[in-house]
Image: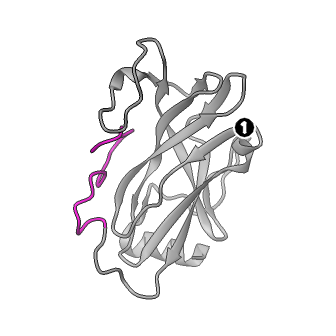
Amino acid sequence: MSDKWIKKMVKEKQMIKPFVNNQIRKKGISYGVSSYGYDARVSNNFKIFTNVDSAIVDPKNFSNQSFVDRKTNVCVIPPNSFALASTVEYFKIPRDIMVICLGKSTYARCGIIVNVTPLEPEWEGHVTLEFSNTTPLPAKIYANEGACQFLFFKGDTECEISYSDRKGKYQGQKDVTLPKL
């Protein structure tokens, strides 16, 4: 969907809060509305993967001991590791929309991959972002700057059952959210 549609949905449905009505660079990584998407910012709360306690990564029984928490404007991710963070923006996805997220090229060109699962119809919350440092060197992530771009796809009809209808486990998340069963 276009920038015109995104602005209309923000006005009518508060789809993105806070919303930046244009592209902002300010000698940093850009964020705000673009031609066919929205470049979201990463917050300053990070969970950085660590192996200090030799925890096993188990999606069915995830241990918070796998991470160290940092509130910082610059997060340093160790080599071949990852960090979790959340978007500054809170999203409320309309019932007939599916959202796909792609990492910013500035990070991708540095070997930093941003991963987000699709935002389903009627999902809402701060999006948890995964930053993977694929390099053998430490890598920096800058809080309150652009991290990824969300692309909005309109279905030909509304879905029968939305994320909200099935009471999805990540509905309404406010900060970095770890895996749940």
**SS type, badge 1:** loop
**167 or 174: which is nearer to us?**
167
Q: Is residue 18 left or right of residue 174?
A: right
| Magenta residues (range) | 163-181
Q: Quadrant of residue 59?
A: top left
Q: Position of residue 20 (x, y in %)?
A: 55, 58
Q: Residue furthest top?
A: 52
The tally of labels here is 1
- Identity, as a three-letter code, of the amino acid under mark 1: Gly
Residue depicted at 36% across the width and 20% down the height: 65
Q: Position of residue 51 (x, y in %)?
A: 48, 16
Secondary structure character of the magenta stretch overall: loop
Q: Position of residue 85 (x, y in %)?
A: 47, 37
Q: Is residue 112 left or right of residue 110?
A: left
**117 or 96: which is nearer to us?**
117
How has the structure been colored for display? one colour
- Asked if residue 62 is positioned above or below residue 11 in the image, the reply reads above
Q: Position of residue 67 (x, y in %)?
A: 42, 23
**Image quadrant for the C terminus?**
top left
| Number of other residues with Cα within 10 Å of mark 1, as a class: few under 14, some 14 to 19, many 20 or more | some
Q: Quadrant of residue 45?
A: top left
Residue depicted at 67% across the width and 70% down the height: 35
According to the picture, the residue beneath numbered tag 1 turns out to be 111
- Asked if residue 81 is positioned above or below residue 110 in the image, the reply reads above
Residue depicted at 44% across the width and 74% down the height: 97
Is 172 within the magenta?
Answer: yes
Residue depicted at 30% across the width and 71% down the height: 162
Is 111 within the magenta?
Answer: no
**160 or 176: which is nearer to us?**
160
Q: Residue furthest bottom?
A: 156
